[in-house]
Image (cartoon, rainbow, N blue to C red):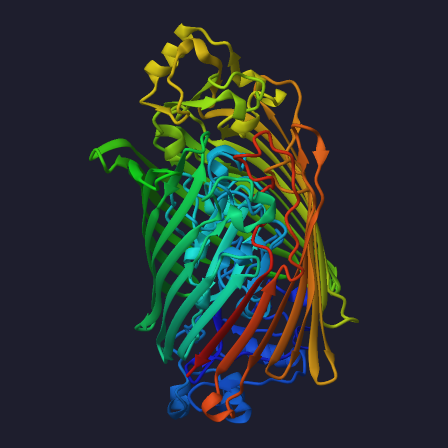
């Protein structure tokens, strides 16, 4: 038996009632009751979606609980029809067509067991229990909030969340090994990857409607910005370990993008913006179309966006760098998304989601010499299809789902003469990822308890990932890897206290989950998770969770060819070295890697006082003990010879035999220095091959609060969030840990964002302040200044009575309104390395954009 939105005229009736008025207690959220369950849809903080499990039963219970003002929208009539449409739906216990209401078009199924109309399944991130609530904190950002804050893609959305680190796979991160963190901090594809707690883009799981997407590039992260924001209903982010629910990669947490299902009409729009200091001229064109019918619906979106680069010469603090040098890449993006769902007969639901994107990028940077610069022109094409079929039998639901994805990253690398502009082809490679999976799951009640139903979810499946690296110039395959895994899982939710147990407003629910995965390369991994949700009163909710998570080594980490690359010692931390002194870097894969393992726990207190309607605050504490991390042990080659933290992996004055052994084990030898290789000139050998060599301990606190209230005829929302992070890591063989958070090229210790949104009719104005703490340069121990930006958005949406202008949406948005520059730090090679931390701070400066859209 599943959770559905109540339907009228083939659309979703959204009950526009204040959450505190519509529910006897906000502690009811996600709780079990004998015959009904309720859930506040957090993407609409001041509204509730009425959910039902038996026809009329849940809604009539709602009316017995409260008296509330309800506005219902009937799509077919395009008018408010509370008496004619909603009341009969609330009172009837039979199919509308059998009650003589077929003319209204109300879509319900005739079920011999009198079950609910089969429409929209409520998706909850962090649990497989239908209607359940996660014991871990979940950040929810709905489509209206995305519009209020002026975000135009999901990359901007995730970078606004304090729990997420903007390093890793993000378009503002610099290339050329100047961003620290090795390949994990390389702007490879121009996309945006979720990077919760700064654990890496491959340690945060990204889902689309609950389904895994294919990895991208050789870092094997997922580009969340490839999903058109115009198709997104909301994104739910749980910054807690979730391998017991979803499997590998969900160590830092999981982000689940939920697509719209109720769009009716056509929307076209355009946007233009640019940085006022120069560069980043942005042009976007979008089109979306959707419709719903009594048994299903469809949504299609298209996006075409192009972005001009920011060059170092356009910013005063980087003008000393050689030209051209990209601080922000040029890119072009085209994406298409299709999502459809259809009822088949009385008991089957079919859903298909499909996405195809292509991103072209251009990036220029120098590496060791001003005579030649490197031109990267990568092209990334992503295809993803996820069908699912759901079957209702009695109170249980059975779901058969699958997913197929492919990501082709074509990397063209030319060497260009700075004097003549003549280009010499150097590399043309394909890093190709493919994935396919199939899963069968079931969910339903197993026992009636005094406080509600105990519910069980269980399932099993199979997943295969493939990765290949091909030299397209030579027509030869550099490497290929494949990993298959089989998995099974179970999750149980048990309500122990509720109003029916005679304990007043107290509510207590326990959850437990376990998952077993078996991999071809390293065997099996079991991950449990336990959760508790307790509400001593209707004003407070206490949540706690404990679990284990893991991340399988990526195929690139396992099978990457070993390479030897030469570099100039002067720019790698030894400025006193001779001009022709060389450093040898030994890097590559390791097929004997084992999975990374983590133990996570979190606890949170949610305050939602009944005496202060519209207010909610949540304070959370979390800890992650992360062991056996796969790393390239030398995170920043420019500090390799100067920083003591890399001493274990540096052999100074290596012998000719040691150098020859490294070269013989390598598949490739690269020398970009312009200096002929001579073993006698090599002053150091750096061993940076992948290894399970790192332990990390991460702990911190998150705080969020929001308050929505009326000011005359207007509505004002004040909200904010902050995250404090403390993390250390210790490399194998070193006795002491070193700090991560608060250090250069790692997450700042404190991130915060707060602001206000004012709504008056169709007019919306918002302003938000973002704070990023300063980071310390380990080379000199100096902490840089913090970075604070002010953003503002003004938008106006016309009403249905505006005649030819109806459906018009105008917006003016500005980020970093005061045009603050990023904090600077002293680099060892100022002539090649930009003097700011691109993983934390942006070089964009003030950006102003104007957008217009029209809905029919």
Front-most of residues 32 and 550: 550
x and y percentages locating residue 705 in the rendered image: 71, 61
Q: Quadrant of residue 557?
A: top left
x and y percentages locating residue 748 in the rendered image: 66, 42
Q: Residue furthest front?
A: 419
Left/right placement of residue 460 relative to residue 205 reads: left
User: Is the residue 381 above or below the residue 415 in the image?
Assistant: below
Residue 707 visible here: yes
Q: Quadrant of residue 106?
A: bottom left
x and y percentages locating residue 361 in the rendered image: 38, 50
User: Is the residue 303 above or below the residue 372 in the image?
Assistant: below
Q: Please tell me which residue is depicted at 50% across the width and 71% down the height of the picture.
A: 53
Q: Please tell me which residue is depicted at 29% across the width and 36% down the height of the picture.
A: 424
Left/right placement of residue 510 relative to residue 537 reads: left
Left/right placement of residue 349 relative to residue 122 reads: left
The quarter of the picture where the C terminus appears is bottom left
Left/right placement of residue 387 relative to residue 618 reads: left
Q: Please tell me which residue is depicted at 24% across the width and 38% down the height of the picture.
A: 472
Q: In which quarter of the image is residue 415?
A: top left
x and y percentages locating residue 496 in the rendered image: 65, 56
Q: Which residue lies furthest to the left in this view?
A: 475
The quarter of the picture where the N terminus appears is bottom left
Front-most of residues 465 and 841: 841
User: Is the residue 618 above or below the residue 813 in the image?
Assistant: above
User: Is the residue 460 above or below the residue 852 in the image?
Assistant: above
Residue 445 visible here: no
Number of labels in the image equals 0
């Amino acid at each position: 038996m599943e959770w559905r939105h109540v339907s009228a005229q083939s659309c979703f009736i959204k009950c526009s009632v204040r959450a505190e008025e519509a529910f006897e207690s906000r502690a009811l959220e996600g709780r079990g009751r004998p015959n009904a369950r309720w859930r506040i849809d957090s993407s609409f903080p001041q509204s509730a979606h009425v959910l039902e499990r038996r026809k009329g039963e849940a809604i009539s219970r709602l009316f017995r609980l409260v008296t509330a003002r309800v506005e219902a929208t009937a799509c077919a009539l395009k008018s408010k029809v509370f008496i004619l449409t909603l009341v009969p739906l609330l009172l009837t216990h039979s199919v509308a067509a059998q009650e003589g209401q077929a003319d209204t078009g109300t879509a319900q199924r005739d079920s011999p067991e009198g079950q609910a109309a089969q429409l929209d399944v409520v998706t909850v991130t962090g649990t497989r229990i239908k209607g359940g609530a996660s014991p871990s904190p979940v950040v929810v950002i709905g489509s209206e909030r995305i519009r209020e804050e002026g975000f135009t893609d999901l990359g901007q959305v995730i970078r606004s969340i304090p729990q997420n680190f903007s390093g890793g796979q993000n378009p503002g991160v610099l290339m050329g090994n100047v961003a620290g963190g090795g390949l994990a901090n390389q702007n490879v594809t121009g996309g945006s990857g979720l990077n919760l707690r700064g654990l890496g883009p491959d340690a945060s799981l990204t889902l689309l409607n609950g389904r895994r997407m294919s990895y991208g590039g050789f870092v094997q992260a997922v580009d969340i910005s490839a999903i058109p924001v115009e198709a997104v209903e909301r994104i739910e982010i749980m910054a807690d370990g979730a391998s017991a629910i979803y499997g590998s990669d969900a160590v830092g947490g999981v982000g689940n993008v939920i697509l719209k299902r109720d769009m009716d009409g056509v929307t076209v729009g355009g946007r233009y913006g640019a940085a006022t200091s120069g560069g980043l001229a942005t042009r976007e064109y979008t089109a979306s179309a959707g419709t719903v019918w009594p048994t299903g619906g469809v949504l299609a979106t298209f996006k075409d966006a192009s972005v001009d680069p920011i060059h170092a010469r356009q910013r005063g603090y980087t003008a000393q760098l050689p030209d051209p040098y990209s601080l922000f890449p040029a890119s072009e993006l085209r994406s298409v998304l299709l999502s459809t769902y259809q009822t088949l007969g009385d008991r089957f639901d079919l859903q298909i989601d499909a996405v195809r994107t292509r991103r072209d990028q251009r990036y220029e940077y120098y590496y060791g010499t001003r005579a030649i610069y490197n031109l990267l022109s990568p092209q990334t094409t992503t295809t993803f299809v996820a069908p699912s079929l759901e079957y209702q039998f009695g109170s249980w639901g059975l779901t058969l789902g699958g997913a197929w994805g492919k990501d082709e990253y074509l990397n063209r690398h030319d060497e260009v003469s700075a004097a003549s502009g003549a280009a010499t082809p150097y590399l043309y490679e394909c890093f190709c990822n493919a994935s396919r999976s199939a899963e069968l799951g079931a969910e339903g009640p197993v026992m009636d308890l005094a406080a509600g139903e105990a519910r069980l979810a269980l399932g099993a499946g199979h997943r295969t990932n493939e990765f290949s690296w091909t030299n397209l110039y030579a027509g030869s395959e550099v490497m290929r890897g494949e990993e298959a895994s089989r998995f099974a899982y179970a999750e149980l939710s048990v309500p122990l206290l509720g109003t029916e147990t005679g304990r007043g407003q107290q509510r207590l629910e326990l959850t437990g989950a376990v998952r077993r995965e078996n991999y071809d390369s390293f065997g099996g991994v079991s991950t449990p998770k336990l959760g508790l949700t307790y509400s001593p009163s209707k004003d407070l909710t206490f949540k706690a969770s404990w679990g284990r998570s893991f991340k399988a080594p990526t195929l690139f980490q396992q099978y990457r060819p070993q390479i030897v690359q030469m570099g100039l010692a002067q720019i790698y931390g030894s400025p006193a070295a001779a001009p022709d002194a060389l450093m040898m870097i030994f890097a590559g894969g390791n097929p004997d890697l084992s999975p990374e393992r983590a133990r996570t726990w979190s606890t949170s207190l949610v305050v939602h006082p009944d005496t202060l309607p519209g207010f909610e605050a949540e304070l959370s504490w979390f800890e992650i003990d992360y062991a056996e991390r796969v790393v390239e042990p030398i995170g920043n080659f420019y500090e390799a010879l100067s920083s003591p933290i890399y001493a274990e992996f540096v052999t100074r004055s290596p012998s000719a035999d040691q150098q020859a052994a490294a070269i013989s084990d390598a598949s490739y030898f690269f020398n970009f220095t312009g200096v002929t290789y001579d073993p006698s000139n090599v002053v150091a050998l750096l061993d940076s091959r992948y290894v399970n060599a790192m332990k990390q301990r991460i702990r911190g606190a998150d705080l969020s609060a929001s308050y929505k209230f009326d000011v005359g005829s207007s509505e004002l929302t004040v909200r904010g969030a902050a995250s404090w992070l403390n993390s250390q890591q210790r490399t194998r063989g070193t006795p002491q840990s070193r700090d991560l958070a608060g250090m250069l090229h790692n997450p700042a210790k404190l991130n915060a964002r707060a602001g206000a949104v004012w709504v008056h009719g169709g007019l919306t104005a918002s302003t938000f302040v973002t704070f990023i703490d300063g980071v310390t340069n380990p080379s000199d121990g100096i902490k840089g200044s913090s970075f604070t930006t002010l953003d503002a958005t003004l938008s106006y949406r016309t009403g249905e009575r505006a005649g030819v202008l109806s459906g018009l949406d105008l917006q003016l948005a500005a980020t970093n309104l005061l045009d603050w520059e990023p904090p600077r730090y002293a680099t060892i090679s100022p002539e090649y390395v930009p003097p700011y931390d691109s993983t934390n701070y942006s070089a964009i400066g003030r950006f102003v954009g104007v957008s217009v859209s029209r809905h029919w």
